[in-house]
Amino acid sequence: MHLTKIKFRVVLLFLMIGSSALIAQQRTGNIVEYFGKEKVNDIKEGKLLHVFTTGLALKFQNFRFNSSSFPKDQVFSRFLMQPNYEPETDDVFDIDFTGKQLLWKSIATDTTNSFNDRSLRSSYVYLSYQSDSEKTVLFEASGHSLVLINGLPHEGDHYDFGWNLIPLKLKKGLNKFVLKVGRFPRIRARLIDPQTSVQFTTRDLTLPDLLVEEDKTYLGAIRIINTSENWVENHTVTSKINGVSLSHQIPNIPPLSVQKVPFKIASVADSKQLGKADLKLSLHAKNGTLINTNTIQIEIKSKHNHHKRTLKSNVDGSVQYYSVAPSSDKNLKDGALFLSVHGASVEAVNQANAYKKKDWGNLIAPTNRRPIGFAWEDWGRLDALEVLADAKNIYKPNSKKIYLTGHSMGGHGTWYLGATYPDKFAAIAPCAGYPDLLLYRNGFTNRMLNMTEEQLKRFGISPKILERLTAERVPTAMENIIHRAGTPSRTLKLIRNYLHHGVYVLHGEIDNVVPTAIARDMRERLGKFHPDFTYYEYPDGTHWYGNHSVDWEPIFSFFKQRTIKEASDIKKYEFFTGSPGVSATSHFITIHQQDTPFETSSFKFSKEDGYKLHTDNVAVIEVDFSALKDDNSSIEIDGTSIKIQNDKSVFFKKVNDAWQITKAPSLKEKGPHRNGGFKDAFRNNVVFVYATNGTPKENEWYYNRARFDAETFWYRANGHIEMVKDVDFSLKKYADRNVVIYGNADNNLAWNKLLKDSPIQVKDYGVNFNGKLLFGNQWGMYFIVPRKDSDTASVGVVTATGSKGMKAAYMNHYLVNGTTFPDVLLFDDEVLLNGMPAVKSAGFFGNDWSVENGDFEWR
């Protein structure tokens, strides 16, 4: 270990996600613009119809910093379960645990037409609009995380970009809007009369840079607004630059929705045209009729300068971008590749721009799907892997010279990705990072114990609140099994995976956003077992102290001295994983199945005295002996000696606590390709299939429920998810794609095509859970099962037994990072009021996807 001299000083550590300290520090320096974007204020999609200037606000103080799969939401519950509820000024909503009345208070906008007041933090805002007729409008709001519009949920705009446009049909008479205030204590809301029923919007473009050295077809993405009540089908987007046109048929767009669709762009080979150029876009119907046009600007650059690239994601078919700091050596071959992951609110472009060119490698900066995205977990993790694979294909780096670094949230991403995929990197360098997201969020609560009464008062924390927040409680069995789905993200449980590579820890000495104490704790942990790490505290360094907060030459010198080992050179190593579906393989050994799902599984391998393998929580494991190039004829696994052929890959299965050679597990079983956890349904070019065979109310709800998830995945993941009516779904047309079903066996006509043999059946007023029956209209469920006609695809299910259950299942926190969802969750309509205690059953199917061999808890 290399240790620099550290000066000690007492630092008051305030850690609040989205706090003023975080924003203030991150807005300094040149890596971060304010979320990388300017807020959209101008309206180009129609005429301004109405500005909401008055409303009601309800302060609902929330000091919980842990993401929850089932957060309590008494306010939305009231509006959902009591559709006629209309608050008035000074109405008492409830009395909180301190004895304080929660009152609806009148609010008004400021000169910017925004509701803007510090007291709005942790508040709900109620707005109303009287319409003299039914009419279709665009609801444009910003600064909120969620909105209920006439009882239907829609995604918010918590980044405060001004991006969100929601097509809706106003009712004649009263229309109600309930907004949950987001990261910032300000809200703006307007109604827009759309200029045409189908049109482009340039809010939230995804564009590549056109590189004059590369003659190829590029991909971009633009959002199309459909304010009609009909599907936009078989339309084409045509782009034109320098007189060259390319057309691309876009996915069908559902009624009253906005979809971000891909389009193609021709190359520009003339280096004299470097700079900005006009790109003309046109939307055409199937018969060629021109529907809409727009002209946007695109950058033409040299690939030898910093630039953006785009790729098509296998998660959802969307277009994602990443940024590149290319090598200064224009003729570089067999060079290094540096994966740099950005911090919260940082655009990938700004991340790459913080680095000077390196003569011995190319640097790539993925997006995490958004500036905050998923903290490099969940779909952020998949984005990093897709970008790494694309860059490897383009730059053809030396496979032994792949490195990982990142700053702040990207420092967490470095700790997390480095622990999850340890054999992919020769060395890692977390800068101003924290290892575990939940521990980071919990840190504020822990530090409150050392605050003075005056300091606590500044955060609005009374002694009674502090007592409630810091009270120790023992998690229930139900909570434990739900939280277990998050084991793959518990980085410290995987800490010994860092033995795969060198580690350089860089942190500012007086960082009060990610407190320096977190880095010092990791230094202490690594010091107990890791032989190859360096720790450096930058003197007087805050969270961001200039580009050398990331572009630190000693890091790259550290990288240069390390390479990934050849499999045949490895004498011993160990590997840990929380789920084979997230991370299964290190070098030449793969964990295929676990004994206990989503508990930590591990192996330790050595060939110093013959092949020896020790496992923990492993049911099936594979060893590729051909990679070892040895002449050993046996292996000892957990004390059992087994004869092997050393020139091929061999599978081993534990039977009655003894290991034996077996054939490769059936792809119909769980494995790295498909291992569950409900979130796993939202990948593999997923398609949403919604019910149309129910009552009008059910059909409206499930259509909107699918649209809500599609809106959320667009906003949080820069995504595009295709929506399909149940009557239009066919197994052949959507072969080998993940499907999420919205509805139940009685109202979704695709149910029997996909779920006829599922051990869980849900109908109107009843659940059959593998023979256990529950009745009533209050039940909601999320679960995932394998798609029977595919070896790789899964089916996710968002379902309910009736109106109460549908509304109980309105939340989609499974699309939020830091939340945990096992294979199955069954709950009732009390979940909005009581949270996790209202979950009736949760757990995991067995490796054969059966309930009998699974692990479930019941309340």
Image (tube, rainbow, N blue to C red):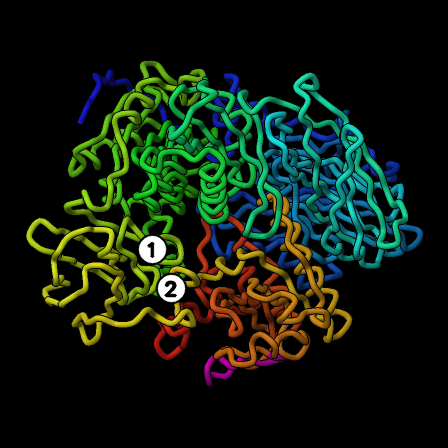
Residue 401 visible in the snapshot:
yes
Q: Quadrant of residue 621?
A: bottom left
Q: At x 45% / y 64%, what residue is drawn?
A: 837
For the residue marked with disc 1, what is the amino acid?
A: Ala
Q: Is residue 214 left or right of residue 669?
A: right
Mark 2 = which residue? 671
Helix, strand or loop under label 1: loop
Q: Nearer the viewer, residue 233 or 678?
A: 233
Quadrant of the image containing the N terminus = top left
From the image, tell me which residue sits under label 1: 584
Task: Tell me which residue sits at (35%, 57%) in the image.
Answer: 579
Residue drawn at (60%, 49%) of the image: 713
Q: Which mark is residue 829?
A: none
Task: State the separation of the CA atoms marked 1 and 2.
Answer: 9 Å
Q: Residue furthest right?
A: 132
Residue 550 locus on image (x, y percent): 41, 23
Nearer-N-terminus badge (1/2): 1
The reply to whether callout 1 and callout 2 are in contact (CB within 8 Å) is yes
Amino acid identity at mark 2:
Gly
**Up-down relation of residue 780 to residue 76 (above or below):** below
Quarter in which the C terminus is drawn: bottom left
- What x and y, as percent, mark residue 857? 38, 71
Magenta stretch holds residue 558: no
- In the image, residue 504 sits, relative to residue 46, either above or below, namely above
Residue 98 % position (x, y): 49, 46
840 and 103: which is toward the camera: 840
State which region is magenta: 763-773
User: Could you tell me which secondary element the residue under label 2 belongs to?
Assistant: loop
Residue 60 lies, with reference to residue 685, above or below; the image says above
Report the side of 266 relative to 286 (left or right): left
